[in-house]
Image (spheres, rainbow, N blue to C red):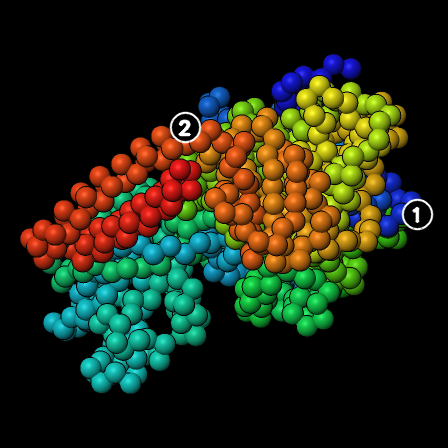
Amino acid sequence: MSIPTKYSASNVESKWYNYWMEHNYFHSVPDEREPYTIVIPPPNVTGVLHMGHMLNNTIQDVLIRRARLQGKNACWVPGTDHASIATEAKVAAKLKAQGIDKNDLTREEFLEHAWEWTHEYGGVILEQLKKLGCSCDWDRTKFTMDDDMSEAVIKVFVDLYNKGLIYRGYRMVNWDPEAKTTLSDEEVIHIEQQGLLYYLEYKIEGSDEKLTIATTRPETIFGDTAICINPKDERFTHLKGKKAIVPICGRVIPIIEDEYVDIEFGTGCLKVTPAHDENDKVIGDKHKLDVVDIFNEDASLNSFGMHYEGQDRFVVRKAVAKELEAAGIIVKSENHINKVGTSERTKAVIEPRLSDQWFLKMEDLAKPALDAVLTNGDVKLFPKKFENTYRHWMENIRDWNISRQLRWGQQIPAFFYGDGKEDFVVAETKEEALKLAQEKINVSSSAVERSLTLEDLTQDSDALDTWFSSWLWPMSVFDGIRNPENEEIKYYYPTNDLVTGPDILFFWVARMIVAGYEYKNEKPFENVYLTGLVRDKQRRKMSKSLGNSPDALKLIEDYGADGVRVGLLLSSAAGNDLMFDEALCQQGRGLANKIWSAFYLTTLWDVSDIEQPNSSKIALEWYESKFQAALIEIEDHFSKYRLSDALMAIYKLIYDDFCGWMLEMIKPAYQKPIDAITYKKVMSIFEENLKIVHPFMPFITEDIWQRIEERTPENALIISKWPEAKPIKSALISEFDFASEVISGIRNIRKQKNIAFKDAINFSVVNNENVANTFDEVISKLGNIERFDTINEPIEGALTFRVKSNEYFIPMEGSIDVDAEIIKLSEELKYTEGFLKSVQGKLKNERFVNNAPEQVVASEKKKEADALAKIETIKASLASLK
């Protein structure tokens, strides 16, 4: 088959990916082999490939391809997450563009649109992962809203409810007014923002006295139901039992006492708004205060906001401040830095809100997961530094708010049948719910009510938090919740490695560990490799808004998938952020080109049954030991999840040792054949190289592997065998390290003295280091040495260099053109003397020496010293030539 002189990724990648798919290499079924399992962190169904996905999935593919080469039954389960908030927002936006308000649709009608959108756009990112070379078992692709996956989620909800771990409560929650749903504490990001602290005067009922209150949110005065003072604050003891009047709305509210109030903050008086602040709610419950909710679900003001009804909270804040200022109620305002909760998904400012929600008790559930990481080491985090973060979260865990006011997602399996808050049952199906409801009312109700029917049941309209489905992912993808003893869950679970970002260490990783111990009494995975964030050269997080995130598919188009994979991994140590630069992809493409050039070189050789040169024999022995030493290093890096270091070790082995040295050592002379023994051995070595490079660069390695010789599908590189450890001849490695310095010394002299490589030279050594002569023939070949002698005394007038204490000599006679060298050195001497004269002129100038900065003067003195030394060397060389 004809071999192109240059490698073209675009002509190779789709060809081999289709070949792998056609022969089902990615698919796994349980058998007698050791399983190696990875479950993909399911990207949002709304997503498209970005740099974070590229890094995360390249790492997973490296691990899965290496496991496959090690003879393990490698199974990489792909899939997508239904992403309740993000997907519902996308569908709602699409409907809005069509003139449809999602609130005008029934749940069923909206879900039809959501499924239509999902079928049209949902598989985009998985198709893009194929471009990267990801060898997922696509036959196992799962979606968190698949029927079987949803059944598992509902089954778990019912089970946890029956265990008393899920409860319904009227609580202060984090409300996202843009998505119009509650969020868990972990989905709220607290950002420091500059705001204002307003000082407002409240009149005391029945007197002319006024009380000054400090607040950052004057718009919430419409929800004030008390003013609170600290009982130890002597400034306000006379106000005990009195009442105050809320500005604008005129509501009369009590003045209460509570030690919660910070005497030092603001004025020492606190306005209490139980409906809109978690701490105020605690005070309100304690003192039995009224609760006045002033906001609609979009954070506009409701009728309690009087003439501001329907206006956005931030618009009202400014308007209320102006109204209060005009009325003389604002005493002053001052700058104030406040931590503002924002939605991780929509970036909207969170509004504390009271509502009925479903919660999962986490304290007891978390204990086995805490021990698994921090006590018995069943689950290992890489890098280990994240254990402290994990500990902090798990030891301070709060009940998980698992309900969301959304339609897209698993609908909460709670069914209401009466008017009271407790008139509900929880069941997997409506039919089961009816039986439970009938049993429940049988105990406490009349015979008339026993005629309850399915039509009398109303299912809770909320959906479950998306994480409540994905926390089951390692089990549910193998149907381990619905059928806990099935063959696949018993074979593949627990999985081996999880690769994800530290930003979801609690959202997802910790919760999966919790679920694993609750439902399998076992860890869900052994190791968690936490990648860093992909940032730009200025250390900024990549984002569309900054315009600093490259188009992932365009990168693959420009540099090839192999080049991009290498570029990403060369500097992505676990847990450390990757400073991405396209130059890294150029370096990756450069490695691909180097490997291809090395292969192309071997195709140019004629092979003959001639005697094997000793230089080739020793070169091959050296590289085999060098390969084995590198293999040990690579295995060590893999065991510690230092994939960047593993790749760098491979890079140096291939680029420097194989291409830079070994091929040069065994390459036949111009228009001469290579001996058959060397050729066969070097191609075997080439194949071993391809195996260790394959996980990182799957496309070019498979292509070269298939070109080396005709292969059957059973002999494809993707399912070949990872190299085995063999004995290492350490002496050979150290001897070559010395020999390579000798060769470099010869090449440097040839370059400096313009001695053409075609011109053979004589070479002598004073072997003070007692170096073995193992590589003498290699030195002779790579240095084009006609005679190589060991001598006892230095050769006067010869060109010389040292390696450690060994002295090497190249007699000038016959090696260089003496007349041309004298002319060259004379010109160099003249230039250097002129340079010295100008430097010394500066240093003799007292004005310069006294006024110039100290470092400038020091620099000029160094120039003088260097020039003097160079002149001495040149004069010595000239003297030896004359």
Using the rendered image of the protein, determine whether residue 627 is visible from the camera's viewpoint: no
The residue nearer to you, when weighing 432 against 534, is: 534
| Left or right of residue 846, residue 95 in this image | right
**Residue 66 location, quadrant:** top right
Residue 110 in the image, given as x and y percentages of width and height:
59, 31
**Residue, x 50% and y 47% (percent of image)?**
796
Query: Would you call the spot at circle 1 few (<14 residues within 10 Å), some (14-19), or many (20 or more)?
Result: few
| Cα–Cα gap, marks 1 and 2 | 75 Å
Q: Give coordinates of residue 705: x percent, y percent.
A: 77, 29
Whichever of labels 1 and 2 marks the residue nearer the N terminus, that label is: 1
Q: Which callout, 1 or 2, points to the residue nearer the camera?
A: 2
Q: Residue furthest front?
A: 882
Does dot 2 land on a helix, a strand or a loop? helix
| Residue 552, placed above or below residue 275 | above
Q: Mark 2 points at which residue?
A: 820
x and y percent of residue 307 in the render? 25, 45
SS for callout 1: loop
Please give the label number shown on residue 32: 1
Q: Type of residue at label 1?
A: Glu
